[in-house]
Amino acid sequence: MSNFIETIYKLYPQVVRTVGEDAFDADGNPVVYDRAVVEASVNATAYQLDREPEYPSLATFADAYYWAQKGDNTKMDEYVAACDAVKAKYPKPE
C-alpha cells in the first residue's frame, strides 16, 4: 500500500476502503478528502521512510549496549555515529 493511501486512512478514519485514490466509507459512499492535506502529511513524514532501511540493526544496538554495560563504549559510539549519519542524510523537515 502506498504511503499516500496509508495517510488517507490515518487522516480520515471513516475511510474503510480505497480504489486507486478514491476513498469510501463503510456504506460505500465516497469520502471527499483534501489532497493537499494528505500530500503535506506524506511529505512531512517521508524522511522516516527514507531513514528506516539505513539505520543500523537492533542486533547491532544490542551488541553495542552489552559492551557499553561492560564499560567499553566503542561500539555504542559507532552505533550512535551511524544513526547520526542517517539523520544528517535525511533531515527532519522543519
Image (spheres, helix red, strand yellow):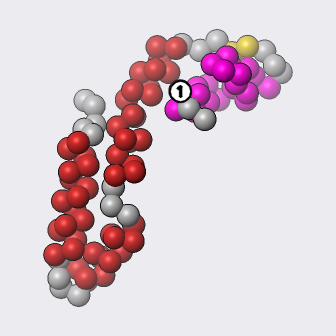
Residue 7 seen anywhere in this rendered image of the structure: no
Q: How many marks?
A: 1
Location of the C terminus (image quadrant): top left
Which is more toward the observer, 90 or 37? 90
Compared with 65, 89 (above or below) is above
In the rendered structure, the answer to whether residue 16 lies left or right of residue 80 reads right
Q: Which residue is mark 1?
A: 4
The residue positioned 59% from the left and 28% from the top of the image is 5
Residue 60 seen anywhere in this rendered image of the structure: yes
Q: Within the image, what quadrant is residue 44 found in? A: top left
For label 1, the SS is helix
- Tell whether position 90 is magenta: no
State the image coordinates of residue 31 (x, y, percent, origin top left): 69, 15
Range drawn in magenta: 3-26
Q: Within the image, what quadrant is residue 19 found in? A: top right
Residue farthest along the bottom direction in this orientation: 70
Amino acid type of the residue tagged 1 in the rendering: Phe
In the rendered structure, the answer to whether residue 73 lies left or right of residue 19 reads left
The residue positioned 64% from the left and 12% from the top of the image is 32
State the image coordinates of residue 57 (x, y, percent, origin top left): 38, 64
